[in-house]
């Protein structure tokens, strides 16, 4: 009898701890599954993905982040966005500066050693953007000897130079927005990165996307390493986002006019680790 009562009491405590937004000491828990508010890392200079306009962030990544946060029980007014460039994504998660990242963040084997990834919530493909008059570049192999943008902390230049061993000449820049300025200024010959990013930049700039995609970029939701509980919930939210039509709506909202072939079925998940 006594044992049964104790077991029941432990059960109640477990349930209480499991549903509370705060730890018993009032601190926020270390999983995004049970947070009262969320700080979400996004880009601020990638049009149609993560872009800051007049103090507010907008774009596909921002909308997906708000949807997932909502499914985790955190409404829009308790979400704060924070600009998180490619070079600081891993450190921002490790330090707790951000709780989650939705920032064109490809899942890679190396990053998986430092970050737990939910998703992917979309699979983009790397392509190459050049000035409209640069007719000699038609695919990734034509980047040999050309000046391409190397955004610090980003993987795209490695896909060209390290994975494909194409002897391009990387020129560093802090963000993809800065790459576009360098391309316009003649300091670069090409910007090779995800097609969604290039599509966001392409409109009205006198540039051309070569339309020769050569990778799969699985956009993951960056979580603090070890937050498996949060990761499972994020994956459930992403599944739901595809099932209830939100993913198709958001893809059309942001990229419907881009000419990109959009995939509206739920991506194959990587599994939480
Ligand atoms: N998706 C690529 C990456 O995660 C390029 C874009 C970016 O750096 O945000 O490295």
Image: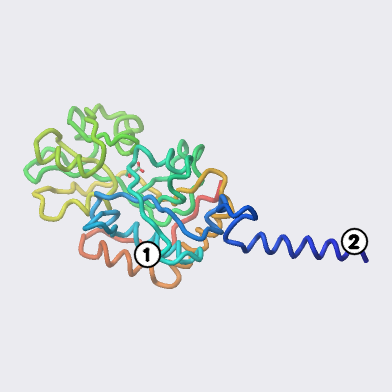
Q: For the residue labelled by badge 2, is the local secondary structure a helix, a strand or a loop?
A: helix
Identify the image quadrant of the N terminus: bottom right
Q: Mark 1 and mark 2: span between their CA atoms?
A: 53 Å
Q: Residues within 10 Å of mark 2 (few under 14, many from 20)?
A: few
Badge 1 is on which residue? 264
Residue found at x 14% / y 35%: 189
| For discs 1 and 2, the disc positioned in front in the rendered view | 2
Residue found at x 68% / y 63%: 16
Farthest residue to the right: give it. 1
Is 70 situated left or right of 26 in this image? left
Residue found at x 39% / y 52%: 102
Total numbered badges shown on the rendered structure: 2
Residue 109 pos. (x, y %):
47, 38
Q: Foreground residue, 257 or 101?
A: 101
Q: For the residue labelled by badge 1, is the local secondary structure a helix, a strand or a loop?
A: loop
Contact? badges 1 and 2 (CB < 8 Å): no
Residue 264 pos. (x, y %):
37, 64
- Label drawn at residue 11: none
Badge 2 is on which residue? 3
Q: Earlier in the sequence, mark 1 or mark 2?
A: 2
Residue found at x 43% / y 39%: 90
Residue 84 pos. (x, y %):
35, 45
Find residue 34 and report its image quarter. bottom right
Is 238 situated left or right of 256 in this image? right
């Amino acid at each position: 009898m006594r044992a049964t009562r104790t077991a029941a009491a432990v059960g109640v405590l477990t349930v209480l701890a499991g549903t509370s937004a705060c730890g018993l000491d009032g601190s926020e828990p270390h999983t995004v599954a049970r947070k009262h508010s969320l700080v979400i890392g996004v880009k601020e200079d990638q049009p149609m993905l993560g872009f800051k306009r007049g103090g507010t962030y907008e774009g596909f990544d921002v909308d997906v982040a708000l949807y997932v946060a909502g499914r985790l029980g955190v409404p829009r007014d308790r979400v704060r966005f924070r600009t998180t460039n490619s070079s600081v994504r891993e450190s921002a998660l490790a330090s707790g500066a951000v709780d989650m990242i939705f920032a064109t963040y490809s899942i890679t084997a190396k990053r998986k050693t430092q970050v737990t990834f939910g998703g992917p919530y979309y699979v983009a493909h790397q392509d190459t953007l050049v000035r409209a008059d640069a007719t000699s570049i038609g695919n990734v192999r034509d980047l040999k000897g050309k000046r391409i943008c190397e955004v610090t902390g980003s993987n795209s230049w490695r896909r060209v130079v390290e994975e494909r061993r194409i002897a391009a000449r990387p020129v560093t820049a802090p963000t993809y927005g800065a790459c576009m300025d360098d391309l316009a200024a003649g300091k670069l010959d090409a910007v090779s990165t995800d097609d969604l990013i290039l599509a966001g930049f392409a409109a009205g700039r006198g540039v051309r996307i070569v339309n020769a995609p050569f990778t799969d970029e699985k956009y993951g939701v960056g979580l603090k390493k070890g937050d498996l509980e949060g990761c499972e919930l994020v994956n459930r939210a992403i599944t739901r986002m595809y099932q209830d039509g939100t993913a198709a709506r958001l893809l059309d909202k942001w990229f419907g006019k881009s000419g990109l072939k959009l995939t509206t079925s739920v991506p194959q998940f990587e599994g939480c680790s």
